[in-house]
Amino acid sequence: MPLDIVPTVCPHDCPSACALEVERIDGRRLGRVRGAGSQSYTRGVVCAKVARYAERQHHPGRLSQPLRRIGEKGAGLNAFRPVSWDAALDEVAEALTRAVQRHGSETVWPYYYAGTMGLVQRDSINRLRHVMRYSREDLTICSALSDAGWLAGVGAKRGVDGREIAKSDLIVVWGGNPVSTQVNVMTHIATARRERGARLIVVDPYRTATAERADLHLAPLPGTDGALACAVMHVLFKEGYADRAYMMRYTDDPEGLEAHLATRDPTWAAGITGLSQDEIVGFARLYGRAKRSYIRVGYGFSRSRNGSAQLFAVSCLPAVTGAWAHEGGGALYSNLGLVAIDHTLIEGLDRLDPSIRMLDQSRIGPVLTGDPRDLGNGPPVTALFVQNTNPMVVAPESRLVHHGFARSDLFACVHEQFMTETAAMADIVLPATTFLEHDDIYLGGAHTYLQLGRAVLPPYAECRSNHDVINGLAERLGARHPGFVMSAIELIDRTLQLSGLPNVESFPHGGRLDCCPSFATGHFLDGFPQTDKRFHFRPDWQAIGPEYARLPAFPDHVEAIDDGDPERPFRLVAAPSRSFLNTSFNNTPSSVAREGRPTALVHPEVLAGLRLADGDRVRIGNQRGSLVVRARGASGMQKRVVIVEGLWPNHAFEEGIGINLLTSADPGLPRGGAVFHDTSVWLRPA
Ligand code: SF4
């Protein structure tokens, strides 16, 4: 059995963007998948779900041919019949054209997200959007809140190289669970602990697998991390840990900050966070004593209405102690802004008309059900073309999303790898390639590499890549743009040249280009990427988003969260599970076996008060509805906190609708963002 090992890149929605080495059997089948040892961030490690990728690649449920729906929406594969590619693409093009003739071009909403993080296969849909003047999509669902918070202080989406964690004396994992969601962080933490005796602090509302490994775990109430960060800074100033010389040189208003924080003491923060004063002071002293202190900022605490303010407050800590200036010190949220890629050709930005309406992807439920706050005076959305996402499960306010997709006047085409619950609502379903079957180029949120991933297997059955389908539709719609007549690799090659980077032929062997900046730039010693080159303790929120008025002048706790009432006393966090990665792996047998079934983690005393035991059914509800899951007692969190890890498919729940039934489509401050961890609920025995 001929077997070779070929390099590629993990495309999934995960900051690690691991460099992979995959076994190819007979040139057609996937064997084992390993992390590339030679890529210095991946260092040979990948998560279990991707190590078992053959399960997903050769899953019997892979879509193999284009399908036209002939039965009920939502009924699944049996409601579809195969059609040829030509017939399917003709039908989609005709439906989009008819919709435009009736309502204008904004009635069509190409809808996508990060099912692949490859720039060509993810973003080519925008080329069609802009050339055809279809509605724009505001990509808020994951990072709008966290981006806003990071940009407020630092000024650009980059931070200290993740490999420097290994040189740290204190690592703070704040609002993330890397053991489950980006395992490579733990590789570098393990090195720091082994070689330097570094300590690990985890800040997370519940005892995650990462928190289990920490020297100190702080579990504030969801949405209160900003208060914790302010009280830590209060102690840093009060007890002499603030580096005033650093602040004078590199920050905008240290005196203003110190005066502002005078009342944000541990007593104040304890009342908001639910932590003890001792916990807060102890954390502040540990942080203040270590100059090589590295904060790895996760996406968790940003999923609140006040998430940008929380993340901003956390990003201020290394500016107070001057940790940014030290090797192994500083913080990282994401490096996706590190490499300046020219997206014009891939996304057709030369054809973007900013007067065309923008619809918020997180509000797909309200959009599809005609909410005037979203549609204004514009036409209804009557045609959707979906790639790389599964909004029937992942978007907030599921009931509205489901009603929207069920509309008889909505045409939907979904290009997918599996018959997801979104695909099952489509009129036409098109089979998509996986990353192993197409070419693409990848940035990494956690590291500094730009990586080229070439196709290593032939397309399964009749599957086509996103880029090829976009080009096929463009041809039928009469859309003209140079990107529509290029192959994916030609598009990559030209994009690299336009970006001033090595082209495909001169790209480093193995497809990995390390774009790590100099130490001075990486640590902002030549200035922060703000107009005045200083870190901003006093951010210009107005420049970041329209809903700036409720955000404070300095880092603070912002009381915008859904903090419950006597009817809904609990705070629900819909956290990511180890095995699913949104919904990308929630149908592979080993992932489902490991996760078991939808489960609520509930404080043991609360569980006892409800007269429930582990494994009993519990109903969770709020004003948007209710659902039943199994309960499990979990200590290491406050009594008001309830955790449901996912994302499970809707059909895994007794009543056929999943956890996002309960989450809100309210936009976070100041420029939108989904608020998945900001949900008040009640609990009852089911
Ligand atoms: S850790 Fe993230 S990037 Fe690495 S293999 Fe797993 S999903 Fe992919």
Image (tube, grey):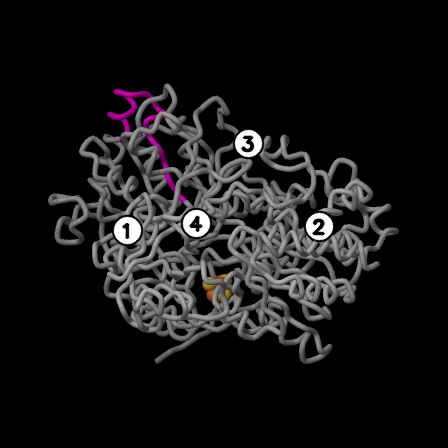
Question: Would you say residue 593 is visible in this rendering?
Answer: yes
Foreground residue among 584 and 193: 193
**Left or right, residue 402 beside residue 219:** left
Q: Gap in Å between the C-alphas at discs 3 and 1? A: 30 Å
- N-term-proximal mark, 2 vs 1: 2
Q: Residues within 10 Å of mark 2 (few under 14, many from 20)?
A: many
Q: Which residue is mark 1?
A: 626
Question: Would you say residue 388 is visible in this rendering?
Answer: no
Q: Are marks 4 and 2 in contact (CB under 8 Å)?
A: no
Q: Amino acid at mark 1?
A: Ser
Foreground residue among 48 and 399: 399
Q: Secondary structure at mark 3?
A: loop
Magenta part of the chain? 96-112
Q: Which residue is mark 2?
A: 316
Q: Gap in Å between the C-alphas at discs 4 and 3? A: 19 Å
Q: Position of residue 352 (x, y in %)?
A: 49, 28
For residue 111, above or below residue 356: below
Q: Gap in Å between the C-alphas at discs 2 and 3? A: 22 Å
Residue shown at 86% from the left, 51% from the top? 244
The quarter of the displayed image where residue 573 is located: bottom left
- N-term-proximal mark, 4 vs 2: 2
Q: Which residue is mark 3?
A: 547
State the quadrant of the C terminus: bottom left
Q: Secondary structure at mark 2?
A: loop
For residue 494, above or below residue 32: above
